[in-house]
Image: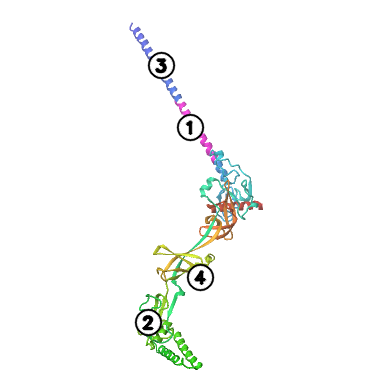
Amino acid sequence: MWNSRPTGMHSDEAHTVSSTSDAPSVFRVFQKSGHLAGRAIWLLVLLVLAGLAIPAVVSFLIAGTVEARKVSRYHCPMHPTVVSDRPGSCPICGMRLVPIDEEESSPTSGHEDHAGHGEPEQVPKGEAHPATTTSGDGAVSAGRMPEGMAGMPAAGDQGVDGRIPVRLSERKRQLIGVRTEPVVRRRLERTIRTVGRVTYDETRLHHVHTKVAGWIERLYANATGEMVQANRPLFTFYSPELVASAQEYLLALEARRRLSDTTLPSVRDSGERLLASARRRLQLFDLTADQIRELERRGTVPTTMTVYAPISGHIISRNITQGEKIEAGTNLLDIADLSHVWVLADIYEYELPFVHVGQPATMTLSYLPDRTFEGKVTLVYPTVSEATRTVKVRIEFANPDYMLRPEMYAQVEIRSNLGEALVVPESAVISTGTRDIAFVDRGNGILEPRELTLGVRLPDVFAVTSGLSEGEQVVTSGNFLIDSESKLKAALSQSEERE
């Protein structure tokens, strides 16, 4: 019994143990199932990532291929015919080789948007022009350059020696800042701006002097700069010679009166001749007709004579004082009429064709900026200053209110009407020293070089006599880079012709 119970108990325990021993096997099943699901999830994630990475890798490889096609060769900036398939140095001058961007060499370049969808066109690998090429081992051999652009003149048909048309895509035009302006016809006016100096009108200067010696008795013009009126007294002086001449005139006048009653014509005529000779002597001493009449009326000789102002003006020089002895011919006073003044302006030699007598001119003063004076050119001096290489121009201005004073500095403008002509902006012209060149936008990205014949060169525009037509678009910005590209391509084309 004792043995059987344990046996029964062992049987239950065995069942229990058996049940317990089955549980780990089920757990392992579930555990294995979880591992498989996790692996499946990770595999799915890897597949998704691979699906996203493959297009990027493909795009990267395509871009690298396109980039390799765009920059597959290098050339020397100083020697365009030296071309290599890898970076290095020029065997001629030692300069570092720079990449050749062949994107623009294809006939289809310049149209980046394909069918308006913004997709870049595939640039076909063009044929090549012969050129000096440095291979990978450094040897110089005959290579091939990209073919010329479709629809463009060949090297033999180029209009400008040493340059050929180039084609730039819209992207490159924006990168180098290409701008164009039309060729227009307009009226040309050349304005010469210079500095002038106000001076006296030399035709309105008068020197006051006497023709006899004497002494100043009274001086009315006391100071330099005073304004005097015409026929007003300047000074009185005593002159023994002049008194004697006046006495002779009175004696001749009395003799004629006495001889007027004689019956002898010869005697009567001698009295007239004597009076005329005495009168003429007084006139040569600058006595006026009024002074001579006053002498006849009074019948006595005054001890002093008065000198009157010949013109209205300002005293600019005074060389006498009260009581001073004067000599014949001594310059006593200088009087200037400032109602008209001259302005002497300096212009350069190259400006002479634009200035002529009678041309209008304007003038402004720094302290009167709101007032403009109008005048005209009265003389272009015939000599050139050796020191400044300038020519003086005389301009006459009215000065009724005496605002213009001698030795003032003024800003002068002389305008010249040059008629109508075709003009281009100054920035559109590339001057090589021997010729003038501009680039014309022919459309479709083509920029064509033109050799120009220029006329008048104004500060902001050039007149064109040949080489351009009205309405054509010329490049005004970025043209130096375009010129360099044009010369490079021309050099490579010339190398092809030599081969």
Picture disc at residue 379: 4
Kindly check if marks 4 and 2 are in contact, taking CB atoms under 8 A apart as contact.
Answer: no
Judging from the image, what secondary structure is the residue with disc 4 in? strand
Mark 2 vs mark 1, CA separation in Å: 118 Å
| Amino acid bearing label 4 | Leu
- Locate residue 120: give its quadrant: top right
Judging from the image, what secondary structure is the residue with disc 3 in? helix
Q: Earlier in the sequence, mark 4 or mark 2?
A: 2
Q: Is residue 230 above or below residue 420?
A: below
x and y, in percent, of residue 153 in the image: 63, 49
Q: Within 10 Å of the Cα at label 1, are there few (<14), some (14-19), or many (20+) other Cα atoms?
A: few
475 vs 68, nearest the viewer = 475
118 vs 492, nearest the viewer = 118
Segment tinted magenta in the rendering: 38-63
Confirm whether the magenta stretch covers residue 45: yes
Residue with the mark numbered 2: 235
| Amino acid bearing label 1 | Leu
Q: Earlier in the sequence, mark 3 or mark 2?
A: 3
Mark 3 vs mark 1, CA separation in Å: 42 Å
| Amino acid bearing label 3 | Asp
